[in-house]
Image (cartoon, rainbow, N blue to C red):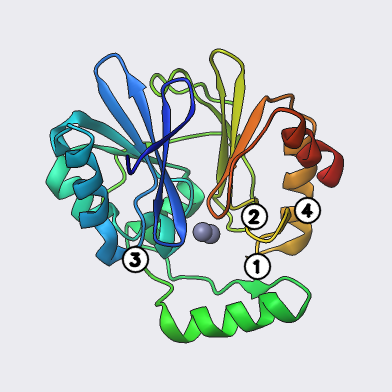
Amino acid sequence: MPFRLIFPGVYEFANGIVNNWLIEDDDGWTLIDTGYPNKQQTILDALTAFGKKPRDIKRILVTHRHPDHAGGLAALKQTTGAPAWMHPLDAGVVRGQVPVKRSTPSPGVLPWVLYHVMVNLVPGDVPPAEIENEIADGQVLPFGGGLRVIHTPGHSAGHCAFLLERDGNLLFAVDACANVMGLTPSFVYDDHAQGRESLRKLARINFDAVCFGHGKVLSGAHAKKFNDKWR
Ligand SMILES: [Zn+2]
Ligand SMILES: [Zn+2]
């Protein structure tokens, strides 16, 4: 099964190096994030294997502007017909209206190496796509089980985390930090101090599980590591 059930009604899908999610709604599915520009077929193949059609995706929620999250949006919108939802501070880049701001690496050798590999291999911009709906901090979205938007700037200006309060609480921390080689800061931020402040904001929330753009879900007692680390 290419999608892994990580919480009631929530499936995580490793699309190359980045995780995408599908949430079951009454009217179909909400897709969170879209992978790199050339990876949309991976999502469509996985959907087919899951017995679903592209039109079963009713909306696409984009967590932030980076190409590993927003890159497949234009192609997937065309295939699914689904409208997009995103924070306005990153929507301008995806719409092609605002130039890309280059992030800078976190301290340490590994982030520095990863940063220079990525800068050389991956363009910072994404194929332009329309964003029909803009989201705001504190808003409870009318889908995805009532996801609550938590604006967490720093990694990018419009980066958002989400809290799903259904059969317990699941936090989508996305790229506010990473859980690839243990729980660490993400390897790049637009604004490192702001990113740290956003992690403190997330650490004040009670949740039963937390998932990441990069790395494995933490649940139960392991999820508390997040609160302890970033408070
Ligand atoms: Zn990112
Ligand atoms: Zn990412």
Q: Is mark 4 within 8 Å of ligand 1?
A: no
Secondary structure under the numbered disc 4 in the rendered image: helix
Q: Earlier in the sequence, mark 2 or mark 1?
A: 2
Residue at the disc numbered 1: 187
Secondary structure under the numbered disc 1 in the rendered image: loop
Numbered circle sitting on residue 126: 3
Please say if 99 is above or below 75: below
Residue lying at 14% horizontally and 35% vertically, measured from the top left: 53
Residue 199 horizontal side relative to residue 103, left or right? right
Residue lying at 67% horizontally and 25% vertically, measured from the top left: 208
**Label 4 environment density (alpha carbons within 10 Å; few <14, some 14–19, many ≥20):** many
**Label 1 environment density (alpha carbons within 10 Å; few <14, some 14–19, many ≥20):** many
Q: Earlier in the sequence, mark 3 or mark 4?
A: 3
Residue 87 horizontal side relative to residue 159, left or right? left
**Given contact means CB atoms under 8 Å apart, are the residues at marks 2 and 1 in contact?**
yes
Residue at the disc numbered 2: 178
Rounded to the nearest whole Å, what is the CA distance between mark 3 and mark 1? 19 Å
**Label 2 environment density (alpha carbons within 10 Å; few <14, some 14–19, many ≥20):** many
Rounded to the nearest whole Å, what is the CA distance between mark 3 and mark 2? 22 Å
Q: Quadrant of residue 59?
A: top left
Residue at the disc numbered 4: 196
Residue lying at 74% horizontally and 81% vertically, measured from the top left: 109
Q: What's under tag 4, amino acid-wise? A: Arg
Q: State the quadrant of the C terminus.
A: top right
**Given contact means CB atoms under 8 Å apart, are the residues at marks 3 and 4 in contact?**
no
Q: State the quadrant of the N terminus.
A: top left
The answer, for residue 137, to whether it is visible in the render is: no
Where residue 199 appears, as percent x and y from the top left, is: 75, 46
Rounded to the nearest whole Å, what is the CA distance between mark 2 and mark 4? 13 Å
Residue 201 horizontal side relative to residue 26, left or right? right
